[in-house]
Image (tube, helix red, strand yellow):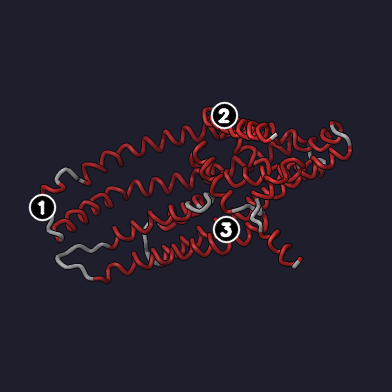
């Protein structure tokens, strides 16, 4: 029996990695499918509500699709404008970086031949010149994937209003109720996650924008938008979002000259302290408190899912990691043989409270 259980366990691990490898290869199709699946949890209730109000299903789906396209269009205009603004000003900062480099090695009395091969203008100039082309290629790939997302989303939304009736007809009453409860629980918790995450990320982005505006760090709105998007990546996203504005504040306020006074570091230090404080409070105090109640996922599971899905699908996988982990936990919760896995995936706070209350 023990040997049989070991074989089953090893085969299960093997199957997981084979499926993961297949999903990794099918990245260009699976990612739009996963994004459409996520969007269906946001758009599905709207479609169901419109159908309940006797709006024809096709009209309801078209209305939701138009709303999604409008949001994507406005987001694309905003991001395109931010990227163009950075590219326009980038030559100035390349020159400033080169000046800082020469100034620092002069003050440190480093022999010129020691770093003779490094030339900021020569190294970064051509890359910045071709960056516009790279942005155009990225936008082309993004639009092609967006089309796939919309196609998948349409088919998912067209089936939403009839799903519960198909389940009721396909299974006995008790099984149908269990299956409906499981899918409703998945929809509810993933919906809660998305709403809370958008609210927390939006608040973080606004605070970063206001802070950098007060400190007069350039591109404050761009860094606020970056903080909003990267905050969807658990743990490391907020740290990554803080690095560019901190570095820019150093480059922007570096004075040069024969002697450097310590006063020029005031703005970079304030930028570092305030940004990290915002990220620490939002990420380590407010978010865990709210997310712990809505998802009840262990921090270790969140980290492992981030690593695993990030390995499979890169940045998009990192963004989708927590909703997927939550869905897996809820499915295990409703399948009798998989309940131990669900318990191990949980945070364990409720179990600790129950144990302490029993004593």
**Closer-to-camera residue (41/11):** 11
Residue 188: x and y in percent read 72, 49
Secondary structure, mark 1, is loop
Q: Residue at x 26, y 49 (%)?
A: 94
Q: Earlier in the sequence, mark 3 or mark 1?
A: 1
Quickly name the residue at label 2.
18
Quickly name the residue at label 1.
111
Q: CA distance from mark 1 to mark 2?
A: 55 Å
Q: Report the disc number at residue 200.
A: 3
Q: CA distance from mark 2 to mark 3?
A: 36 Å
Q: Residue at x 39, y 63 (%)?
A: 272
Secondary structure, mark 3, is helix
Q: Say whether residue 332 is left or right of residue 180.
A: left
Q: Mark 2 vs mark 3: give the one in front.
A: 2
Residue 239: x and y in percent read 44, 55
Classify residue 66 by image quadrant: top right
**Closer-to-camera residue (311/47):** 311
Q: Say whether residue 340 is left or right of residue 29.
A: right
């Amino acid at each position: 029996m023990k040997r049989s259980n070991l074989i089953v366990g090893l085969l299960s691990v093997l199957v997981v990695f084979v499926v993961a490898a297949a999903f990794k290869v099918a990245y260009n199709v699976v990612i739009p499918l996963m994004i459409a699946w996520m969007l269906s949890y946001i758009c599905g209730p709207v479609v169901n509500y419109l159908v309940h109000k006797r709006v024809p299903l096709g009209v309801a789906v078209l209305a939701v699709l138009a709303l999604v396209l409008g949001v994507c269009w406005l987001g694309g205009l905003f991001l395109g404008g931010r990227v163009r603004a950075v590219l326009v000003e980038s030559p100035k900062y390349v020159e400033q970086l080169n000046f800082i480099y020469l100034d620092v090695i002069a003050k440190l009395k480093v022999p010129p031949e020691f770093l003779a091969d490094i030339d900021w203008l020569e190294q970064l100039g051509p890359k910045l010149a071709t960056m516009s082309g790279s942005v155009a290629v990225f936008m082309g790939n993004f639009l092609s994937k967006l089309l796939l997302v919309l196609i998948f989303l349409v088919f998912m939304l067209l089936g939403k209003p009839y799903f519960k009736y198909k389940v009721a007809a396909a299974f006995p009453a008790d099984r149908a109720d269990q299956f409906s409860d499981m899918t409703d629980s998945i929809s509810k918790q993933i919906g809660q996650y998305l709403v809370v995450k958008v609210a927390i990320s939006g608040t973080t982005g606004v605070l970063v924008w206001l802070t950098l505006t007060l400190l007069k760090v350039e591109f404050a709105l761009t860094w606020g938008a970056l903080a909003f998007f990267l905050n969807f990546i658990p743990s490391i996203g907020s740290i990554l979002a803080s690095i560019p504005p901190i570095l820019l504040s150093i480059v922007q306020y570096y004075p040069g000259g024969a002697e450097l006074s310590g006063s020029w570091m005031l703005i970079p230090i304030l930028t570092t302290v305030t940004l990290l404080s915002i990220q620490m409070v939002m990420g380590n105090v407010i978010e865990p408190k709210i997310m712990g109640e809505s998802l009840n996922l262990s921090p270790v599971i969140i980290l492992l899912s981030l690593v695993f899905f990030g390995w499979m699908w890169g940045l998009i996988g990192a963004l989708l990691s927590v909703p997927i982990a939550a869905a897996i936990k809820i499915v295990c919760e409703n399948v009798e043989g998989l309940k131990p896995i669900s318990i191990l995936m949980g945070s364990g706070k409720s179990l600790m409270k129950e144990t302490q209350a029993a004593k």
